[in-house]
Image (cartoon, grey):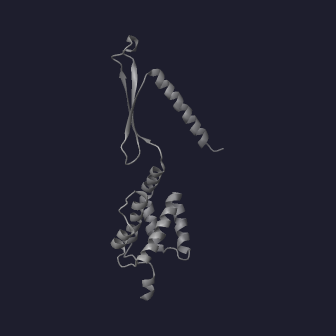
């Protein structure tokens, strides 16, 4: 009985550890400031001493950070967790299974959060377009000519968006398409492996 008390708090099933990983992810990746160490310990491991829980939380937080920063696929994750189970002071097989299941369910959301946190500038959130016919103009030769109206929503996550409305005549649309084609060619050249 004394040996069981010296180990990290034993989870009753996998729920407390899975919830701990969820709490760590909420605080680290989803910007939930209210998820504190005290809250997690009180809700998930109330019987654990603060030092024991702090060690468990630090270990799980470090593992999750390593997994997330490497954006591990399932094969990489399996190899990583196997190495962690064999390491002295590492994790148990049950803990590895919980971590693997958690990562499988949360990988995409955590990856998107990391990408959003690393962006400095606004991004294109949405774009709509339509083609209208000009019915009024200062110059009579511009009446009944088609124009493309492009509306773009720009912004960062959790911030108010800005809207940009552009109007293009046929020449400007062709010029824009030419520039976009040049961008596509440059990107293709950069991504091709030799």
Residue at figure coordinates x 47%, y 51% from the top left:
115
Task: Say above or below: 33 vs 41.
Answer: above
Nearer-the-camera pick, 123 or 133: 123
Residue projecting furthest to the right: 194
Give the position of the C terminus as an image quadrant.
Answer: top right
Quadrant assignment, res 109: bottom left
Residue at figure coordinates x 46%, y 74% from the top left:
55
Task: Say above or below: 6 vs 74.
Answer: below
Can residue 72 be spotted in the picture? no
Nearer-the-camera pick, 157 or 109: 157
Residue at figure coordinates x 54%, y 66% from the top left:
80
Give the position of the N terminus as an image quadrant.
Answer: bottom left
Nearer-the-camera pick, 51 or 16: 51
Residue 3 position within the rendered picture, expressed as x and y whole percent measured from the top left: 45, 86
Residue 27 position within the rendered picture, expressed as x and y whole percent measured from the top left: 40, 61
Can residue 60 be spotted in the picture? yes
Residue 128 position within the rendered picture, expressed as x and y whole percent measured from the top left: 38, 34
Task: Say above or below: 44 vs 119.
Answer: below
């Amino acid at each position: 009985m004394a040996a069981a008390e010296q180990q990290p708090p034993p989870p009753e099933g996998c729920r407390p550890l899975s919830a701990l990983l969820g709490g760590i992810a909420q605080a680290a990746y989803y910007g939930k400031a209210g998820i504190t160490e005290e809250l997690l310990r009180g809700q998930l491991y109330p019987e654990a001493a603060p030092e024991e829980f702090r060690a468990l939380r630090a270990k799980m937080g470090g593992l999750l950070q390593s997994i997330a920063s490497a954006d591990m696929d399932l094969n990489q994750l399996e190899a990583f967790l196997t190495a962690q189970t064999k390491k002295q002071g590492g994790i148990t097989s049950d803990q590895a299974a919980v971590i693997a299941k958690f990562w499988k369910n949360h990988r995409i959301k955590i990856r998107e959060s990391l990408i959003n946190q690393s962006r400095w500038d606004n991004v294109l959130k949405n774009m709509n377009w339509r083609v209208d016919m000009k019915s009024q103009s200062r110059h009579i030769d511009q009446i009944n000519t088609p124009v493309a109206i492009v509306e773009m929503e720009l912004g960062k996550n959790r911030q108010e968006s800005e809207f940009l409305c552009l109007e293009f005549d046929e020449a400007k649309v062709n010029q824009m398409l030419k520039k976009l084609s040049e961008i596509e060619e440059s990107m293709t050249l950069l991504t091709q492996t030799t």
